[in-house]
Image (spheres, rainbow, N blue to C red):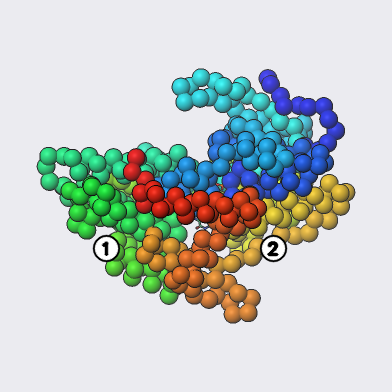
Amino acid sequence: MESSQTFSSIPDIVIVGGGAGGLELATKLGNKLGKKGRARITLIDSTRTHIWKPLLHQVASGASDPADHALEYLAQASWHGFQFRLGTMDGLDRVAKKIHLAPVYNESGEMIIPEREFPYDTLVLSVGSVGNDFGIPGVKEHCLFLDTKAQAVGFQKKLLETLIRVNTQQRKVEAGQLDVAIVGGGATGVELAAQLHQVTRQLTQYGLDVVNPDSDIRISVIDAGARVLPMLPEHISAQVTRELAKLGIDVISQAKVTKVSPAGIEINNDKVIPAAISVWAAGIKAPEFLSTLGLEVNRINQIKVKKNLLSESDDNIFAVGDCAAFPVDENGMSVPPRAQAAHQQASFVARAICRRLRGNPEIGEYVYRDFGSLITLGRYSTVGSLMSDLTGSVKVTGFFARLVYLSLYKMHQFALHGLVRTGLLTLTQLLRRTVDPSIKLH
Ligand SMILES: Cc1cc2nc3c(=O)[nH]c(=O)nc-3n(C[C@H](O)[C@H](O)[C@H](O)COP(=O)(O)OP(=O)(O)OC[C@H]3O[C@@H](n4cnc5c(N)ncnc54)[C@H](O)[C@@H]3O)c2cc1C
C-alpha cells in the first residue's frame, strides 16, 4: 500500500474536509506554520475544488454559476503553505496515528490513485454533513439532495431540461408536469423555493415562454413542524410565510412525510403532493463512516467533542463544523450546523494548534457566538434577526439585511484570500454580471 510517510521530524497536521471550516483552517495554519517550516499541513478532500456550501441553493436554481465561485484546492495550497491530497477518508488507526484513504477512481471507473495512509500528529476532522433521510421509504431514490456541488449542478440541469422539454412539446403543459416539492422548511428549503420562483420567471424571459410560471409551476415547501424557520423568532417566520404566500408558494406545515414516489411526496400516510421534482432539505447527519472510527459519536454520527473541540475519545483529534457535536446546553442541544459555527471553530482550532506546538497544553474553551440568522428570498427580500449583547435579538430587513447576509460569504473569502483578493474577486463578479445572463442557461 502506498503511504505518504516522509522522514522529516516536523509535526504532521492532517485536516480531512476542505469546506467552510477545514479550508479556512488549512489556509490559516499553512500561512502561520507551513510557510515557516514549523509543521507540515496536509488538507485532504474527496473533491478537487471547494465551493462554499451556502451557495449551493443558488447553484441549484441557476442563479449562480459554480465556475464563478469554485476554488482549486491545489492552487490554494501552493499559495498558502499547505499540501493538498485528493481522497476520501474511510478508516483510522488511532494507535499508529494514521488515517486511511480509499482508492480514487476517475469518471470512467479507472483507478487513478490507490488506497493510501497518512500519518498524523494532530488530526482535524471537518467532513461536514449530508441530508438525513430518516430512513423514510423512497427519499434516497426519488429526492434530489443539496449536499455537494455535483448534486446542485444535477438539480440545475434537471430543472432546465424539464422546462426545455415542456417548452418544446407539441401538447399543452399538463397539470403537475412542472411542480416542485421541497421537504424541509428550514433556511435551505425556504431560500431555494424563493430562488426557484425567481429563476423560473427569468427563464421565460430568455425564450422558454410557452410555460406560464404563474399557472404552470407550483412550488411547495413541506414541513413536519407547526411553522417554517423554527430557528427564527415566530414573527419573522410569520412574515416569511406571508411573503412566500404572496409569491404563490404553498407552505404545507404539520405534514409528516411518510413516503416518496416518482409521483410526489406522501404526507401523514394520506395525501400525495404531486411533484415532477422532489427535493430533500429536512435535516442533516454527519457522514456514516465517522461512526466506524472508534470515536464517541451521537445518534447522527457527529463526533462528540469536549469544550476545547478535542474528541471526547482522543486528545490528538479535533472535530469542527457540522461533523462535531459541541454541547450548547444541558438538554443535549449541539451548536447548529451553520457556516458561522464552522468559521468560528476553525479560528479556535488554529489558535489551539499553534499553542500546543509552542508546548502550551492550555488551549482554553470554545464559546459559540450566535450572531443570528438571515433568510434571503431571492431578489425579493431579505429578513432575519441579529443577536446583540445589549438588545438581544433584533429584527433586520431590506438592504441592510441583504448586506449582512452577503458579508458572511465575504468573511469566508477574506479568511481564504485576504482583503485585496477578496476585493478583486468581488469586483470581477460584479463586472461579470454586466455581461453574463442573469441565470445559467446550460
Ligand atoms: C443549500 C445550503 C444552504 C446553506 N445556507 C447557510 C447559510 O445561509 N448560513 C449558514 O450559516 N449556513 C448555511 N448552510 C450550512 C453550512 O453550509 C454548513 O454548516 C457549513 O458548510 C459546514 O461547514 P463544514 O466545514 O463543517 O462542512 P462543509 O462545508 O460541508 O465541508 C465538508 C468538506 O468535507 C469533504 N468531505 C466529506 N467527507 C469526506 C471524506 N470522507 N474524506 C475527505 N473529504 C470529505 C467534502 O467534500 C467537503 O469539502 C447551508 C447549507 C446548505 C446545504
Give the position of the N terminus as an image quadrant. top right
Count all numbered tags in the image, as a single digit.
2
Q: Circle 1 sits in a helix, a strand or a loop, which is it? A: loop
Left or right of 14? Residue 238 is: left
Along the line of sight, which residue is nearer the eye, 364 or 77? 77
Along the line of sight, which residue is nearer the eye, 208 or 230? 208
Q: Which residue lies furthest to the left in this view?
A: 171
Q: Ligand 1 within 8 A of label 2's CB?
A: no
Name the residue at 49% across, 75% down.
395
Image quadrant assignment for residue 252: bottom left
Q: Label 2 amino acid?
A: Val
Q: Can residue 16 be seen in this view?
A: no
Q: Label 1 amino acid?
A: Gly
Left or right of 395? Residue 390 is: right
Q: Distance between the residues labelled 2 and 1?
A: 41 Å
Which residue lies under the disc numbered 2?
367
Looking at the image, residue 43 lies above or below residue 7: below
Looking at the image, residue 209 lies above or below residue 255: above
Q: Circle 2 sits in a helix, a strand or a loop, which is it? A: loop
Left or right of 406? Residue 90 is: right
Return the x and y of residue 365 as percentages of the image width and height: 75, 60
Q: Which of marks 2 and 1 is in front?
A: 1
Along the line of sight, which residue is nearer the eye, 124 or 346? 346
Residue 248's disc is: 1
Looking at the image, tell me whether mark 2 or mark 1 is earlier in sequence order. Answer: 1
Name the residue at 40% across, 67% down.
381
Residue 17's disc is: none
Give the position of the C terminus as an image quadrant. top left
Return the x and y of residue 389 as percentages of the image width and height: 64, 76
